[in-house]
Each structure stands twice: as structure tokens, then as C-alpha cells.
Amino acid sequence: MEKRRAIYAMLLACALFAAGGCAKQELVKKDEGIAPQVAAKPVEQKHVATQPAQKPAIPAEQPKQQAVTAQETVKSSDAESSLQSALEKVYFDFDAADLSEQARAALTKDAGLLQKQPATKVRIEGNCDERGSAEYNLALGERRAVSAKKYLVTLGIAEGRLSTISYGKERPAVQGHDEAAWAKNRRDEFVVTP
């Protein structure tokens, strides 16, 4: 009997809890938010005007300077994207970081373009084909990027404008498992950086 009372008491408590926890929709107040502020009526002021009202002085140069800065940014961005598309890739022989005659010719053209834009910085990205371990290809890609950087420096490009990175075999230009694909993946690419 006592167990039944305990069970009934528990059931009654659960029912009251459930009924009390479920609020009816009309009992819930809507969120009215913060009451809008009523704008105060402006106080009329009567002044005797002895001089004409003066507008605050705005320098005439300011809008022109902003326009010139925006134009220079667009020109700079256009020049950088134009340079980016003009820079030639440099390709390497299998397992080599030495520059071929074709690579030197491409770098000479790139140096000429870089000399026309002396403020532009470039990142040289060394890449490899899929053969070899990841560690070996990272080292080989770095040697390739450094080789191109050194040659550009000998052509008069400031070393501070050039940075290098190696992606090893992680960024193939061409998918494939033959010499034609591998030859296109053994390369240095040049990326204009801010």
C-alpha cells in the first residue's frame, strides 16, 4: 500500500511538473524590446544674424586625394595582375635543380619585367613531380626555387623582393603518371605578393 502511494505521488508530481512546465501560448508575453525614444521637439532659437553663416572648411584636396589613391590602387592591382600573367614558369630536368638554357632565358625575360616594377615582390614556388618521397621532393623544390632566386639576383633583382617556398609534389600542374605530366610538374612558378 505504501508503495502504491509513493508511485501515485511520483506520478502526480510528474504530471504537475509537466503541466507547469508547458506554458500556454497566450500566457507568454511577446518581447516588446526597448521602448522607442520619443524625439524631443527642437527648441526654437532666435538669433540675430550679424554675419552670414559659414560652412565648416573642408579641404578641397581631400576628395581628390582619395580619388587619386583609389586610382593608384586600381592601377597597381592591374599592373600586378598583368605582371603575374606575364611571368614565365621555369622547368627542370628529372631530379635536378640546375637551370637549363631555356630556364635562363625565361628568367631573363622575368627579370626584365620585374625591373619595370621595382616595388613589386615575388614568391618563387618550387614544385616537383610525383616520384620520390614527400621529404625529398620538398628539399628538391626548395633547391629549385633558390636556384631561380640566385639567378634573378645576378640579373639585378634585389634579393629582398624575392622569397622562396617549396610545395614538393603537393601541387601538380598536370594530373598524370607519365613523362609528359611529370615534365610539366617539375617547375618553378612566380607569384606576385603584396
Image (cartoon, grey):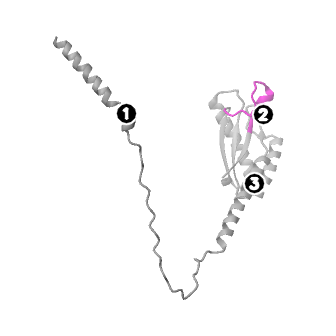
* Residue 71 counted in the magenta span: no
- The residues bearing labels 2 and 1 have C-alpha atoms spaced at a distance of 71 Å
Crowd band around label 3 with a 10 angstrom C-alpha radius: few (<14), some (14–19), many (20+):
few
**Label of residue 184 in the image:** 2
In the rendering, at what x and y percent does residue 145 appear? 70, 42
Q: Secondary structure at mark 1?
A: loop
Q: Secondary structure at mark 2?
A: helix
Residue 134 picture quarter: top right
Residue reaching furthest to the front: 26
Q: Label 3 near label 2: C-beta < 8 Å?
A: no
**Earlier-in-chain disc, 2 versus 3:** 3
- The residues bearing labels 1 and 3 have C-alpha atoms spaced at a distance of 63 Å
Residue at the image position 69 percent from the left and 34 percent from the top: 171
Reading the image, the residue beneath label 3 is: 78
**Label of residue 116 in the image:** none
Q: Amino acid at mark 2?
A: Lys
**Earlier-in-chain disc, 1 versus 3:** 1
Residue reaching furthest to the bottom: 50
Q: Which residues are magenta?
A: 170-187
**Which quadrant of the rendered structure holds the N terminus?**
top left
Q: Amino acid at mark 1?
A: Lys
Residue at the image position 59 percent from the left and 78 percent from the top: 55
In the rendering, at what x and y percent does residue 121 appear? 69, 53
Q: Secondary structure at mark 3?
A: helix
Reading the image, the residue beneath label 1 is: 24
* Residue 185 counted in the magenta span: yes
Residue at the image position 72 percent from the left and 52 percent from the top: 153
**Earlier-in-chain disc, 2 versus 1:** 1
In the rendering, at what x and y percent does residue 172 appear? 71, 32
Q: Nearer the viewer, mark 2 or mark 3?
A: 3
- Which of these two is toward me, 138 or 118? 118
User: Position of 136 compared to 173: left or right?
Assistant: left
